[in-house]
Amino acid sequence: MAKYGLLGRHIDYSFSRGFFNDKFAREQRSDVYVNLDFPHLEDFTSWFKNQNELQGFNVTIPYKETIMSYLDELDPIAAAIGAVNTVVIRSKDTTNQSIKGYNTDYLGFHQSLEHWGLSDLNKALVLGTGGAAKAVVYALQTKGFDILQLTRKAQKQDKLANASLDGSKHQLIAYDQLTVKDMQKYRLIVNCTPVGTFPSVDQAPELPYDALGPEHFLYDLIYNPEETEFLKRGREAGAKIKNGYQMLVLQALAAWELWQNSDV
Ligand code: NAP
C-alpha cells in the first residue's frame, strides 16, 4: 500500500482526497490519500522522518512557497514559478530519502488552455499575485502571451516594474489603474484570486464589467461554485467562460504521473 496526501492548513474541503480515493477504488488499488493538515510547517522535518509509506504529496494554501525550503531538489519550472504544489519522494528508505518539488498547477492550466482553443489570442489579464497566479503567468508566458497582472498592493507593482525592464511583456498594475482600453486589448481574463469562492458567492473581482463583450474569454480558477459571479457577468456579456474544474483534474493527474514515474 502506498500513501499520498495533501499538505495544507484547514483543508477539510479538499478536492484531492476525494478525487484520489475514488480513483484508487475504481482501479482496485489499496493506496490511500489523506489530508496532512499542518497548523505550521516547523514540525515538517521531524514528522516526515517517520512517513515510511508516503510516496508523494500535494501542497496547497498556505504552503506552496514555504515548502520549498524543506525540499532536497526543485524542478526548474517550479523554481522559475516560485511555487510547488506536488512533491515526489524518491526513495523508500527513510534514512536516505530525497524529496523533489514540482508545479503541476502550471501543467494543468497549460493543458486546459489547449482544450479551450484560444489560438488567436496573445494578451491576457491576470488577477492576483499568489501561487496560482505565478503558475498561470508562467504558462501564459510559455505560450507567448503579453500579460497585464492586477494586484491590490502597490509595493508589488514596483518590484515587477523593475523586472519588466528586462524586456518581458509583463506589467503589474493596481486595479484602479486598469482602463477600458486595457479591457478591450486583453481579451483573456484569468481570475487567480479567491474572490467569489463559496460561501462568498456574490463577490467578484473589481473590474469594469461593462467593457466585456463576446470577444472576451473569462477563466476562473475557482471551481466552487461552478459559475462564479465573475463568470456569470462574463456570460451575460456574451463572453466565453470556463471554471477551474478541468485544471484541477489535470493538475491532479499530472501529480499522479510524477508519483508513478520513479525516474523523475
Ligand atoms: P493565494 O496564494 O492566497 O493568492 C491569492 C491572490 O489573490 C493573492 O495573492 C492576492 O493578490 C489576491 N487576493 C486575495 N484576496 C483577495 C481579495 N479579497 N480581493 C482581491 N484579490 C485578492 O491563493 P492561490 O493558491 O494563488 O489560489 C488562488 C485561487 O485559485 C483560489 O481560489 C484557489 O482555490 C484557486 N486555485 C485553483 C486551482 C485549480 O486547479 N483550479 C489551482 C490552484 C488554485 P494581491 O494581494 O496581489 O491582490
Image (cartoon, rainbow, N blue to C red):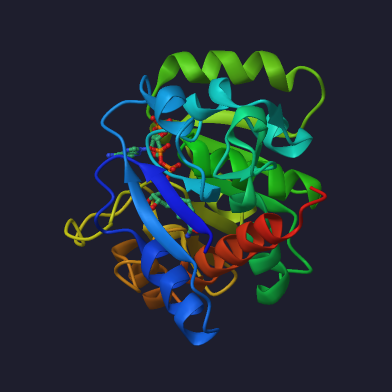
Q: Is residue 33 above or below residue 66?
A: below
Give the image quarter of residue 110: bottom right
Query: In the image, what residue occupies the spot 44% across and 52% down?
Result: 5
Q: Position of residue 16 (x, y in %)?
A: 42, 62
Q: In front here: 95 or 138?
A: 95
What residue is drawn where x is 37% and y is 29%?
152
40 w.r.t. 234: above or below: above
Nearer to me, 103 or 37: 37
What's the residue at 75%, 55% (across, down)?
122
Between 99 and 235, the one lying in front of the other is: 99
Image spot of residue 260 (x, y percent):
70, 61
Ligand 1 sits in which quadrant? top left
Q: Position of residue 28 (x, y in %)?
A: 52, 84
250 relative to 42 in the view: left or right: right
Whether residue 239 can be seen here: no
Asked whether, in this view, residue 152 is left or right of residue 39, the answer is right
Q: Quadrant of residue 99?
A: top right
The relative height of residue 174 versus residue 139 in the rendered view (above or below) is above
